[in-house]
Amino acid sequence: MSLVTLRVNGTEHTVDVDPSTRLLYVLRNDLGLRGPRFGCGLGQCGACTVIIDGVATRSCTTLTSRVQGEITTLEGLSPDGDLDPVQLAWIEEQVPQCGFCQNGQIMTAKALLDRNPDPTDEEIRTGMQRALCRCMTYYRVQAAIKRAAATMRQGAPDAEETAR
């Protein structure tokens, strides 16, 4: 076991873990975060995605001992309770069906939009190709990303507008 310090959603955490422990298990089991989910365990489906220093990263294959930088989980997108434009677009476009993949879809979309605030349809499809959805809501995902991009370009609505 060894002490590892992680910065997650703006807060520093020190955990005592085996160096080979995957980040997903620390986030869920030690820090109690439920956004990232165990899907395939191979880094292929995307359910476990977090953002590390702006990059969508599969936490199920990432060694905790090797993580450096700021980790953002789904919970970190709305630290003050106001939903991120990506989360709002997901609701407005009614993206989720079963909901299992939504963490990976949202986190991948957020990283994509932070890199490219005005993606084309092709750039969205390419950027999202590793975030799998068994319910096949890909057209809704694309619509939500376009909506979020437009909202982000115009400036996020304030909390009063969101409540309407």
Image: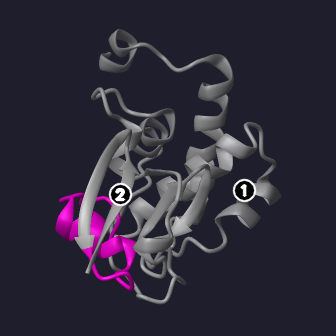
Classify residue 32 as left or right of residue 22: left
Identify residue for label 2: 5
Find the residue positioned furthest to the front.
2
Which circle, 1 or 2, is nearer the viewer?
2
* The stretch drawn in magenta includes residue 36: yes
Identify residue for label 1: 124
104 to 89, vertically: above or below:
below
Question: Residue 6 appears in which quarter of the rendering?
Answer: bottom left
Q: Residue at x 28, y 52 (%)?
A: 13
- The type of residue carrying mark 1 is Ile
| x and y, in percent, of residue 98 in the image | 31, 68
Classify residue 36 as left or right of residue 49: left
Front residue of 58/146: it is: 58
State the separation of the CA atoms marked 1 and 2: 34 Å
SS category of the residue bearing label 2: strand
93 to 164, vertically: above or below:
below
Span shown in magenta: 17-37
Q: Residue at x 26, y 76 (%)?
A: 17
Label of residue 24 in the image: none
Q: Quadrant of the C terminus?
A: top left
